Amino acid sequence: MSLTIILHVTTSYLNLNLNTSKNTTKVANFKVKLRTKPIYHCDPLLSVVSNNSAMHASAQPGQPAIRSSLIDPDGGALVDLVVPESKKASKALEAESLPKVNLTKVDLEWVHVISEGWASPLRGFMREDQYLQSLHFNSLRTQDGSVVNMSLPIVLAIDDETKERIGSSPIVGLLGPNGDLIGILSSIEIYKHNKEERIARTWGSTAPGLPYVEEAITPAGNWLIGGDLEVLEHIKYNDGLDHYRLSPQQLRKEFDRRQADAVFAFQLRNPVHNGHALLMNDTRRRLLEMGYKNPILLLHPLGGFTKPDDVPLDVRMEQHSKVLEDGVLDPETTIVGIFPSPMHYAGPTEVQWHAKARINAGANFYIVGRDPAGMGHPTEKRDLYDPDHGKKVLSMAPGLEKLNILPFRVAAYDNVEKKMAFFDPSRAKDFLFISGTKMRAFAKSGESPPDGFMCPGGWKVLVNYYESLQTEEASEQQAVLSA
Amino acid sequence: MSLTIILHVTTSYLNLNLNTSKNTTKVANFKVKLRTKPIYHCDPLLSVVSNNSAMHASAQPGQPAIRSSLIDPDGGALVDLVVPESKKASKALEAESLPKVNLTKVDLEWVHVISEGWASPLRGFMREDQYLQSLHFNSLRTQDGSVVNMSLPIVLAIDDETKERIGSSPIVGLLGPNGDLIGILSSIEIYKHNKEERIARTWGSTAPGLPYVEEAITPAGNWLIGGDLEVLEHIKYNDGLDHYRLSPQQLRKEFDRRQADAVFAFQLRNPVHNGHALLMNDTRRRLLEMGYKNPILLLHPLGGFTKPDDVPLDVRMEQHSKVLEDGVLDPETTIVGIFPSPMHYAGPTEVQWHAKARINAGANFYIVGRDPAGMGHPTEKRDLYDPDHGKKVLSMAPGLEKLNILPFRVAAYDNVEKKMAFFDPSRAKDFLFISGTKMRAFAKSGESPPDGFMCPGGWKVLVNYYESLQTEEASEQQAVLSA
């Protein structure tokens, strides 16, 4: 059984070595709050994931990329940039003498994404020609003339001082947030980081308060560095959740092992309520009706950067596990993995990235709902994006033609049937829409949502989380008062 | 001989009927300054254009679109939305009872552009699916699955009151700025005009002071109306320059008549100096070297909205005519026409539009220079766009693969040779770069630029123009002082 370490320490920027009975777990220099008191027991999906031990054992770096028969990765072959074990020592030695670039936490998440092939055929941080295509066309032309989707610029920013240090070196070493050597970027190209243009074209807004912008762009340097990436080993976070971080290669293998004839991906960054579950189960039913014999659900929570008021990853993973434990979703036909990308909250631009990455992971169906990757406008009283634009843009996006897009039907709480159900406009007054904000308000106040909104086990996870937040806030207030 | 009316009247927003010996010229309700005293004689390119009378005579509305052998229009056939003469009366009658939409001057320029097929295969103002593709992908997928370039949203904004008035009518009449019935928009779709998103994605900036935004977006309504366009007749401006407004159909016919085996287009919104001329003549030389026997230059000044400090269209046309009269460009191998589009100053996004429209006009080569469609950042001390991005984006743009892009070589004033020459970095100190701002400063002060910068006839046109502006300013100041 794997080990989950939960510390409750309010100091950010830790760099700890924690000795435990069996593992030495290095916690990276990440801006996270660790809880001392576990609010849940660990590794609840082990029963599901452990079915797949064959998959884990065989997914060694350097092995040839796997093609699932369901859908080809973009560019034809899955990119794998982990240096083979045999060359690791020499690469590490080579990197020692190179000028170094320091990665932020978000940069490292992108290294993770690129190195495992989620962004195939991208083989590194974007050079300027790729950046411009992404920014203007949301797609890249490959060498054979075909077009792949690429809606988010996947770039690495450096400051003037780092640029100076690199000088004319064609290659640099990459250091993780805790100073570890992560990998190498070669045949580099350094070009200007016009933040205003990048933000405007990616978000369709330059309003202050866009979470990714504030986290990863505003504080970043005025240069971008592109090049070919190699990493010394698979990126790990040692947060007790790494076993959920299945690579596209591992996922494809698992879909093949389960003999899936359809894989439908569900991207999420929120707890799963029974409306989501209804939708996923209904999708499976529809696929069976279409003649598929063994449709597999990829329940695929986003694991990278999210905004502070989103539910943290560890709590969400616990909540998802309860949904499976409680039988709301069927473990036999569901795979739960973590999608390592950071969140942009860039609506119609970002939903393309979410879908494209799942092609690379082997999903040939993608579920899209209302306002995917959207949020409220940071300075105006409206949604940042038209809630319908996401699915419209997705259905027309270059390079996504081979993916089957499954638009959501809207689910809401049916006050008559006392359960989540597809909204029926002919009796609109019977339905109650429970927004994320409303759900959080229920959980914070300890109030129960209507019966049937979420499975009791999942709901309890949320209540515990918000209680722990309140305890924390109270003790912080106490500390302020007594200071 | 056609008639040019030049009035010097400082009052804007005129609505005049001017009786002249032969014509009744209706001057539309445009925000223009008309000069009472001609600063140049009229129709100087008649000798060139009159060679083409056959072209003018045969370009009747309703005739089948013409395909030049050099390059196919986007979508395969040139769009022509002018109602055939035989149906004009019935269409006008039909329009009478329809709800009406009032067009601004810029809207009418777009009606002009769409109706003559510059934006082929677009057949009207964009519906939402086209708008979203343009905004996100700078391209449109056609019914046969092929992709055409479409980088600027070509949209028509209406306000709440107009939307209300339209109600559930599927069709509307379009009224020009002076109240004339211009055409009909049918199978309409009304959708939200998110100005912030449109501006951010089109310009890569939302800074205040973007000229097209201030002119045409900020004051516009909060809805966009798309649909199929028909116009009752070719759009005319009655400003003495209509004979320069050759449609794509007319241009294609003329290229065929001249038996062009290559057509290279030069987009401009500034006076032609000898550096431009060097470049155009050098391009012709290169095309001859490549084996083409009869390359024709399409000198194609933009005729729609430009920012206030740009040189006005009539002055530019006079200046261009001098360049041909003075023999700097060869009238035998040059066609001068006006490109009716308004200017966005949207850099890499707009240059694609400029190139795409010239495909439809029959050009198979397109010259692109430093910072095309660029300008200074409205609030920061820098260029709004990286000066190299325009040509990079153009060379990668979806739907423009069939167009040959010819990047500029930089020309500057060679102080040794006393003429404009291609910049030679090995003797950089011999070269003087004369910016548009510097050129205007010379012309305003009456000072001569270095010998060989511009042909004397062309330079005189500019000096006269700036003198007339100063006279005007002085009399305005006088009026203020004596008031």
Image: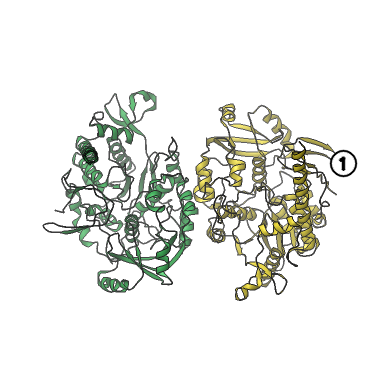
Chain colours: A yellow, B green
- Classify 10 Å Cα crowding around label 1: few (below 14), some (14-19), many (20 and above): few
Chain to which the residue tagged by mark 1 belongs:
A
How many numbered discs? Answer: 1
**Is B92 drawn above or below residue A27 in the view shown?**
below
Residue A203 image point, x, y percent = 54, 49
- Left or right: B67 with respect to A428? left
Q: Quadrant of residue B473?
A: top left
Q: Amino acid at mark 1?
A: Lys
Q: For mark 1, give the secondary structure.
A: loop
Residue visible at 28% across and 42% down? Answer: B311
Could you tell me which quadrant the C terminus of chain B lies in? top left
Which residue is the site of mark 1?
Answer: A22
**Is B171 drawn above or below residue A441 in the view shown?**
below
Farthest left residue in view: B21
- Left or right: B144 with respect to B354? right
Residue A450 image point, x, y percent = 73, 66
- State the residue in front, A211 or B328: A211
Q: Quadrant of residue A423?
A: bottom right
- Left or right: B72 with respect to A75? left
Residue B71 image point, x, y percent = 36, 54
Is residue B328 in view?
A: no
